[in-house]
Image: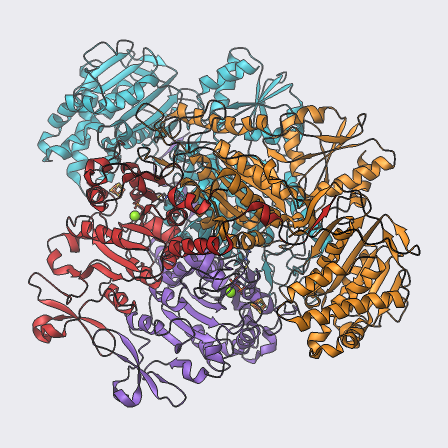
Chain colours: A red, B purple, C cyan, D orange
Amino acid sequence: MSDPIAMATQGRGVTEASDGVGTLTRKDFESDQEIRWCPGCGDYAVLSAVQNVMPELGIPREKIVFISGIGCSSRFPYYMNTYGLHGIHGRAAAIATGIATARPDLQVWVVTGDGDGLSIGGNHLIHALRRNVNLKILLFNNQVYGLTKGQYSPTSEMGKVTKSTPFGSLERPFNPVSIALGAEATFVGRTIDVERKHLPQMLRQAAAHRGSAFIEIYQNCNIFNDGAFIALTGKEKSQNRIYIEHGQPIRFGPNNERGVVATSTGQLEIVDVAEVGEDKLLVHDAHRGDPGLAFSLSRLADGPTTPTPLGIFRQVEAPVYGDGMESQLRAAAEQQGPGDLAELLMTGDTWTVD
Amino acid sequence: MSDPIAMATQGRGVTEASDGVGTLTRKDFESDQEIRWCPGCGDYAVLSAVQNVMPELGIPREKIVFISGIGCSSRFPYYMNTYGLHGIHGRAAAIATGIATARPDLQVWVVTGDGDGLSIGGNHLIHALRRNVNLKILLFNNQVYGLTKGQYSPTSEMGKVTKSTPFGSLERPFNPVSIALGAEATFVGRTIDVERKHLPQMLRQAAAHRGSAFIEIYQNCNIFNDGAFIALTGKEKSQNRIYIEHGQPIRFGPNNERGVVATSTGQLEIVDVAEVGEDKLLVHDAHRGDPGLAFSLSRLADGPTTPTPLGIFRQVEAPVYGDGMESQLRAAAEQQGPGDLAELLMTGDTWTVD
Amino acid sequence: MSTQIAPPKQPGADRKELDQVVIRFAGDSGDGMQLTGERFTSATAFFGNDLATQPDFPAEIRAPAGTIPGVSAFQIQFSDHDILTPGDAPSVLVAMNPAALKAHLKELLVGGLLVVNSDAFDKRNLDKVGYDSNPLEDDSLKSYQVYDIAMTSMTLEAVKGVGLNKKEAGRCKNMFALGVISWMYGRPLKPTIDWLDKKFARKPELAEANTKALKAGHAFGETAELTAFEVKPATIAPGTYRRITGNQAIAYGLLAASVQSKLPLFLGSYPITPASDILHELSRHKNFGVRTIQAEDEIAAAGMALGAAFSGHLGVTTTSGPGLDLKSETLGLAIALELPMIVVDIQRGGPSTGLPTKTEQSDLLHAMYGRHGESPLPIVASYSPASCFWAAVESARIAIKYMTPVILLSDGYIANGAEPWRITALGKLPDISRDFTTQPNMGDDFWPYLRDDVTLSRPWAIPGTPGLEHRIGGLEKADGTGNISYEPENHELMSELRAAKIKAIEEDIDPLEWRGDEDANVLVLGWGGTYGAIGAACRSLRHAGKKIAHAHIRHLSPFPRNTEDVLGRFDKVIVPELNMGQLSKLIRAEFLIDAQSISKMQGQPFRSSELEQMILERM
Amino acid sequence: MSTQIAPPKQPGADRKELDQVVIRFAGDSGDGMQLTGERFTSATAFFGNDLATQPDFPAEIRAPAGTIPGVSAFQIQFSDHDILTPGDAPSVLVAMNPAALKAHLKELLVGGLLVVNSDAFDKRNLDKVGYDSNPLEDDSLKSYQVYDIAMTSMTLEAVKGVGLNKKEAGRCKNMFALGVISWMYGRPLKPTIDWLDKKFARKPELAEANTKALKAGHAFGETAELTAFEVKPATIAPGTYRRITGNQAIAYGLLAASVQSKLPLFLGSYPITPASDILHELSRHKNFGVRTIQAEDEIAAAGMALGAAFSGHLGVTTTSGPGLDLKSETLGLAIALELPMIVVDIQRGGPSTGLPTKTEQSDLLHAMYGRHGESPLPIVASYSPASCFWAAVESARIAIKYMTPVILLSDGYIANGAEPWRITALGKLPDISRDFTTQPNMGDDFWPYLRDDVTLSRPWAIPGTPGLEHRIGGLEKADGTGNISYEPENHELMSELRAAKIKAIEEDIDPLEWRGDEDANVLVLGWGGTYGAIGAACRSLRHAGKKIAHAHIRHLSPFPRNTEDVLGRFDKVIVPELNMGQLSKLIRAEFLIDAQSISKMQGQPFRSSELEQMILERM
Ligand SMILES: Cc1ncc(C[n+]2csc(CCOP(=O)(O)OP(=O)(O)O)c2C)c(N)n1
Ligand SMILES: Cc1ncc(C[n+]2csc(CCOP(=O)(O)OP(=O)(O)O)c2C)c(N)n1
Ligand code: SF4
Ligand code: SF4
Ligand SMILES: [Mg+2]
Ligand SMILES: [Mg+2]
């Protein structure tokens, strides 16, 4: 009898890795499909960053899978010359959980939008994070529904006037980083489509993380929500971008003149460094077991219109769902021997008629 | 033409409140249906507490609605002599959102389980909290699926052996308080089925809160998960219950000898009061705009097996979804005049043929 | 504000008379073709022709400019007699760039008129769509009558004085094109100029520039002596008209249903093409007391509508196929609860995400059977843009009277298509209100499942009513009391009652009508958005001397009570559908009639000519 | 570990000979009736009778002790000939308390044997179920042969020496009851004693006490000279047997399919009655490499299974009606992706939450049509507990070979029901493996939708295969390349191909068999769990001299290729279903045959006797 565990992890007929992993280039990750985003859309920059980073990861192309739901951003897999599945609206995380659990040998990326991932797909997202499934999740947050032509989304600010809210939205937005942390995520980051250096860095670190890595990417939809992140990408960007880095004091501003401290009442505050002194600044600790600090950092900005942290809020080791599954399978096979169908059918009360 | 807004808020034919609101008793809230929970189930205690508190609220019975999904706990509405709807699995929050938004004159309670509310119904729950719909949500957390006879739930601890995890569960649990806070909840509390005083207090405060009030109730399922909360209900309960109260320093233990402090690195720690001094203790601030502190408090205990906060983590005022809706309706009617169908049909390009 | 105008003077005698024309405007998404088409339509309506229109949006949001996926088109048919569809193939094609030409030329009738913006035919644009040589210069267009007009440059010239930058100025070229076509078909300019003035009230320079371009196009037509045509006004029933799309009509119909039922309207919806516009439209009418929620998903949207229904509102949820899948379970609950609720499904090409911007009629069997258990519900289908108004009111009437969820089926074709609509006299709308129950109905008790003898419908007592507190749920319940019941006989009884209640609606809906030859042997039976195409095909067949009849089913569940009688009159029943034979399956199962299916699965409506052919083959 | 035993010595000549008996054990949920029934069944199997069993669980988890909702029952029919069902009404009722008596007495055959635990008939218990007087003392039971036995006290007496407390000791009374019944029907005690020893290996005092109670009951039967019966062993095909429930058989069938397809099994599931046991069972077999995930909901469960399928696993999801609703959209995606996947639906009473613990066959039309768009898929139905094994393997075979999702329909009745199963010789299981594609199939390219000429099935290339990287999705795609395509003709082609692929499976499945009189005019056509009841009814009718035939459809989509021929042989086709006529609708639509529906909607299977009557009325 064959060994289904080995079958599963190696994949029948696909055991030989392709040649020349080390020599892959960006071009190898471009598919032959014409890209159909609006000219000027932030999605292009993210695609480009991903295609640039891929060859660095040292993973053969055939071992990479991109899974998406539905939305402008969810067209992403079509443009990657890897394995890919363009799913249904909101279900990317669930489908990807199936793939990552079935095939721990693959690197599975999920591309989703603020509607796809946080509206209809919110549940699958939080459960994937909770389970710590081995997924790299890129949430393209343009604070709007692009593909359906401009309705507000769960990340749109209150009062937003859209096609479905002509008098202004009445809903308080989600903060994707907060919700991910509330859902026990082990890796949570945030970056911006136009961040040519920061975005690839985030991608690399997500790729290196074992378990669910969640990155919120602020993405400009120039057609339906142009300038949503202008505070972070426009003239005042240096005043508003707070880069957080593990082990580093948190400070920002054109001359690093502002910083973050923790008060004795358990609150984070933005302060003038000159006033409080450098050594009082909060040193970011992304590896802390307790997500409390990361969560508080996620609350510094009330929407991306004031100073907003970018970087990795949290990155901790925790049991990976798929790993646990594999060990149980191995342990069972070792303890009970590989499954034998004939034997199995004979369990319980049997009797023989001659 | 009739005024649909008035119609909606008052309800046609139901404008007269019933008599004797002040004289209602617990009995008035008991329905005539036989209760079908297992003998010894924690659900009885919660039902009893709710029936006790109801008359105090001063709300006529007919203005109260109980909505549930499916599960043992979700049988709740049948036992309340109010309006009630036993829905489908996971959708109670969505159905209740419809009711609360359509009828701001009603007080809408949602009864859900850890499976109903956090597994299949997780998305509706977090969206209701985000919107701050005027709902009182009671999540009966027994850390198991009762009605389907004992599978693990999203709040079950890792390693739990159940019917569907004979080798132990591989999933990291949700902390319901954390996820609610991550979802922008304005009122988040926690209590225990057997808490004869604390539970009713929580219910009263939830009833008084405008917007979504979320209470996690640790509920013992004596058939499939007996003793899950024994650390908080058994012999050692006084060592493990941390009652948090707004404006009060956080301390606990049989002799209040332990307490909680916030460190300069933004972390909460459990300390001996004698060692740090009373005045260093963290004073709970449930009304703080930033949910960071509440969130950190929710992380003090890693599952209800160590010292665990009980009480109200957060209670802040924020725009209520239904209120915003009503104001928009009123504003529109005032500015544009009440809708006139004939006039509406005549908008746009029209032409007349004689 | 209706504008009453006298028909313009008869155009000069040099105009060639036509009884009907089909024009298609095609250009890049950024070229404003929808607007051009709509303005032409307005002018045509003012002029007094009968007409029907159809937009054709690109599937992508905004594909790169100048590419085929980026082409947007608008078609109008107008005539001196009553017409039923926006026309099959256009006899006139306006192509604003090479992509538009390439995408649409194959549909232009041979010998048809081709009006192109020659300025756009530069190398870059030609390359983008793979033209090796300029079709305006080789002789690939020789089977058409081509007017290549330097629209962009003439527009720039015309608006020079206004002070726009070049990009803005160039954008006016659609008005130039409209001017040209208006001259050719003798359309009045005034309605368009008035509209421009109003639209650009705050930007008068844009109003001026566009007007100039429009007039320049018109003048060009006259000066260049382009062939001029005349399509006489049609004899049209007197009354006030407006143009309406199917989705607008559903929104208005729901508003009307709210008014006529005295129930506040509550819409829970999640955006999806091609249904989103109903959400958009209803969100604007807050002064009608309409509550609209963009829910987190379709399940929530349905749940919210159901919750609203429980509390005494007219609960509605709108969606398209994938969303209907997700609403199945909630629909089952609504059936068990016996609460009124309307689910609007604007069908699109499936399965799965399929062809989201294209039309299809393939959700009928899903609407009928797409829930576990025996869960019958009424289905109403609109059949033309304006009929969507009726369908919405009718769905609400049935839902409320029979305490049941109702599915309203429309489709992408009629949702976006428009036709003139004789504005329904409000006085004629039915009163569809019902009283809430406010008193005990069984001694001192209230029994939520005590049924009406005739309608079998249960009482509706809403929260807030003192003394009628009660609980309902999805578990089987005892008839009468509504208490949970696992009794075998009760379940059978309730199953039968639920079915009988829906079946009984057949007595309360219009019988099936048919029109055609009394002595016809063949009946063409349709439903939904194929109405116009079937009607036109049958008309044409009858003109050609064939004996034929047409019936169109508007109630798919239950069928009209005389359906069997009507079908029985004919030897042959042919059922054209934009699916693989779904109604024909139902007809076969129900009446054991060998209904012949005509199927088209191309994301496109039937052309009446192709349908004529297909019917002929089966006659 | 099969146990080979010689049939016990023929019981004494004083035993009354019967050819068949139906016994129902009924008691409180806490009384261990399922276990008692199962032990009796084992002994009966050892003895060599043919048999079938059926549990009847309470709807509540654990309703208060002594109440009617808390009653749990188990029925067995055994005989000296082959039988098809667990029997209609019991001829023997064992009632452990007043609630059990009250709940089940009405089904006991008049003149039947009633064995009661008289100790439980105290005032408190009688009051709980509303008995004004003790039925053992008034003469309300006079139409039955009553044995009232003080089981509790005799049990306490028997186990006195073992050292259990009173509660524990009292719990052994079910073994006492089993002993009594074993004596009456001449069942061997040894298998039960062996089992007790094994089960309580770690608690020998419990093994001892239970054994003592069992023997005491047996001795009591003998001493009290209760009537003794004999049911001779049946002639049974030689081989090794085990008892199997439908859900177990599905789990084993899926394991077998995994082995035979060389694909690791992946189950994504969300608990729901009556399907959860498949999840429970498969979770135990990790040494087979089975991955089971309890997903957050049914949508996720289906999505996970689909993801697993994409990556080369045998993706399965199991559920019941409400869950099937939720899987609709994912099923549509699987159809568009053309990936193999199995959806198991254990049908229960609907609509909505309905009767969750009761059986029904009312999801057939939902399985067939419950997705938007044209989305055909194969449907396989099991028809008895053991046939679930076949159905699982067959579903997998079709799914893999044709790259399609398959729905397997079972129901609550056969899911929980058990029957002896001649353990399939492994060697006979078909090889259902297929090769993954590992090489380009179009020059240097890989086309994911390049179809096999015969099966129309597309290649399956899984992630990890170098050079075959490709993207698939739910948008319509070009046949061959699989690239997104909005082309009208391609959509029609793909729609037709998807339909043709499913239709073509008819060539690859067993033809429809029928059995009965060659010259019969009437065919009884069934599907699913009614197999036994229809078979028994037809057998009985034939015994009574009626000409009749029975065919049972196991493939509902597509139908077996000879279905029309078979149906055409008969003048009349009668279709009994536990729904309101769903298969009969399909038959009518497909074959224009006036199939007559027999419908039962009581959450209960057909009794063969009532079915016999119903068929007779329609003959
Ligand atoms: C079940 C279902 N519901 C709704 C839709 C329509 N739909 C497609 S994408 C989308 C939202 C897109 O927003 P987002 O996820 O933010 O992606 P973006 O387009 O902004 O990148 C919606 C509502 C659908 N395809 N399927
Ligand atoms: C759509 C659907 N899926 C699954 C079920 C089966 N089901 C009923 S209740 C339940 C979980 C109950 O757990 P929980 O919500 O924690 O409630 P408890 O019984 O523990 O109070 C499940 C899975 C269902 N009724 N409907
Ligand atoms: S609509 Fe917005 S998000 Fe979508 S492609 Fe265009 S710019 Fe990008
Ligand atoms: S199963 Fe558990 S939760 Fe359900 S009623 Fe019984 S004790 Fe309570
Ligand atoms: Mg978005
Ligand atoms: Mg629970």
Q: Residue at x 51, y 13 (%)?
A: C543
Residue C425 seen in the figure: no
Q: Where is D183 relative to A33, above or below? A: below
Asked whether, in this view, residue D230 is left or right of residue A33, the answer is right
The spot of residue B348 in percent (x, y) is 34, 39
The spot of residue C483 in percent (x, y) is 65, 61
Q: Where is D227 relative to A13, above or below? A: below
Q: Nearer the viewer, residue D6 or C58?
A: D6
Asked whether, in this view, residue A344 is left or right of residue D193, the answer is left
The quadrant of the rendered image in which ligand 3 is seen is: top left
Q: How many marks?
A: 0
The quadrant of the image that shows the C terminus of chain A is top right
Residue B133 seen in the figure: yes
Q: Nearer the viewer, residue C484 or B354?
A: C484
Residue lying farthest to the right in this orientation: D14
Asked whether, in this view, residue B201 is left or right of residue A230, the answer is right
The spot of residue A203 in percent (x, y) is 23, 50
The spot of residue D357 in percent (x, y) is 64, 55
